[in-house]
Image (tube, grey):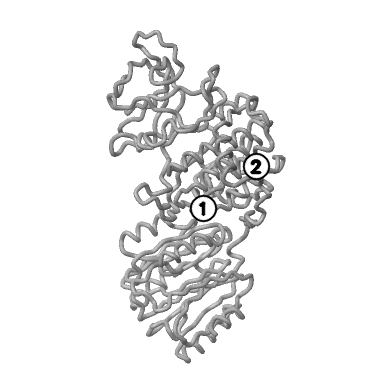
Amino acid sequence: QVQVGGSPWYRIERKLGKGGFGQVCVGRRVSATNTNDRNGSGALEVALKFEHRSSKGCNYGPPYEWQVYNTLGGSHGIPQVHYKGRQGDYYVMVMDMLGPSLWDVWNNNSHTMSIEMVACIAIEAISILEKMHSRGYVHGDVKPENFLLGPTGTPDEKKLFLVDLGLATRWRDSSTGLHVEYDQRPDVFRGTVRYASVHAHLGRTCSRRDDLESLAYTLIFLLRGRLPWQGYQGENKGFLVCKKKMSTSPEALCCFCPAPFKQFVEHVVNLKFDEEPNYAKYISLFDGIVGPNPDIRPINTEGALELIYQVGQKRGRLSMDEEEDEQPKKKLRLGMPATQWISVYNARRPMKQRYHYNVADGRLAQHIEKGNEDGLFISSVASCQNLWALIMDAGTGFSAQVYELSPYFLHKEWIMEQWEKNYYISAIAGATNGGSLVVMSKGTSYLQQSYKVSESFPFKWINKKWREGFHVTSMATSGSRWGVVMSRGAGFSDQVVELDFLYPSEGIHRRWDSGYRITATAATWDQAAFVLSVPRRRPADETQETLRTSAFPSTHVKVKYA
């Protein structure tokens, strides 16, 4: 039996389900009252959510979810919490008893759901998220299992509720009212792989757009019964699912679905990190495919009608084609980073710089020797289709330089030998055939160096090295392998990584605005990584530009020199 926080006594009847942190059971009121209430604080049956005090969510006392329910509980579409407290080893929340989840409904209806039902769910779910977002929170785990209908056989049975606020986070700072800062931690994933947004997979800070992208996947799942990325297995599952999401166009995802579904997907996958979603616009998309009489809709959409009315009052009339110029520019999330040249330009005082590209192994030595004779050292190298590109310039500050062209990707013995002679790695490139070009120099600021070759981007290792005072100073790839060099004494006060399947334009611009500059970049055929750093000594001119071209940008380089 359970009693917490001044509640009546409840007998635990049966298990309803298990969440990420805790489990939910039916509690039946024991104390003799002749109440037959179906909900409210005196209800005969309630839902009891148990969380063990040693669980992840309870490290610092009561579950984090409690404070979210304090802010949101009982608002539109969020169930009411009546009592909470601790009993024995468990934290317990006493909540309204609800009905089946949308997953249950879909599952019990031979894995199908009508267009009208899914459109009604869309309308009501958008309005629930709008209400939640307006209070400063994002849900963080939108999926069919977390949407519940009211209890069967009651006036609420057609009402939609959003539950499980354990992963909810603030998108708006409660003290300043400002949007939270953008960040990316590629080793952090929160949510459910099948429904998570691409940004969540990539470890970006959660914001309003992520809930809507997850809702889009939820709706398509309910309507089509399957998502194109289901069925991946193994430890690489998250990466493969994310890659598939990136390469599936809204057209392909929504084929056989009415047009509004595709339009909704197109809108939400193009939202910027801190952009305010146009909730009323999204609702009006789906409003056109459900019957005009709200009373006979399979889901109660009153909450949404209120939202449309409010916005309608402000705007006059609302239709999707009214603001044509506002349609998102079609951003195709398709492409192969390693088939493009990405060049990075920094503004600085005039100096001697020269470039060579499409250089075969046999021609490398003569170019480098000629450059050395003219007082130039290699500052940067790259490879394309087993041919090399190099930049040599007079402003490196190096006093001596050696290089090795090797059939191995980062030839350990040679590197160790040069370290002994006080040379440090200053540039690396890898070729598709598994070989590499490693350049090591004297006169760098480096005090110590370490490098790693791995089959996937080694963010965990980078993170560990950051804590030890190292920073990434060069990077390369060979086939699907990554090589990352980190050094102590690199002259950076901070460093971050932007990792994406394409060129992460929004992330790079946000980092630029915060004083970071690109200091290393590399790409495999399906992933691009950019390392951005804050220099300890700020350059006089901080301008930095990037350019993406299909061939080596020789003409553009000349324009930039000028």
- Mark drawn on residue 243: none
- Seen in the picture, residue 272 relative to 231 is either above or below; the reply is below
In primary-sequence order, the first of circles 1 and 2 is 1
- The quadrant of the image that shows the C terminus is bottom right
Name the one closer to the observer, 114 or 388: 114
Instruction: Identify the amino acid type marked 1.
Output: Glu
Res. 332 in view: no
- Hey, which quadrant is residue 264 in on the image? top right
The x, y position of residue 262, in whole percent, is 66, 45
Name the one closer to the observer, 166 or 292: 292
Q: Residues within 10 Å of mark 2 (few under 14, many from 20)?
A: many
The x, y position of residue 501, in whole percent, is 55, 57
Q: In the picture provided, is 437 more to the left or to the right than 467?
A: right
Residue shown at 68% from the left, 47% from the top: 252
Name the one closer to the observer, 98 or 318: 318
- Mark drawn on residue 285: 2
- Mark drawn on residue 275: 1
Residue shown at 64% from the left, 54% from the top: 327
Q: Pointers 1 and 2 in contact (CB under 8 A)?
A: no
Q: In 3D space, how far apart are the residues under numbered discs 1 and 2 (Cα atoms)? A: 19 Å
Secondary structure category for the residue under label 2: helix
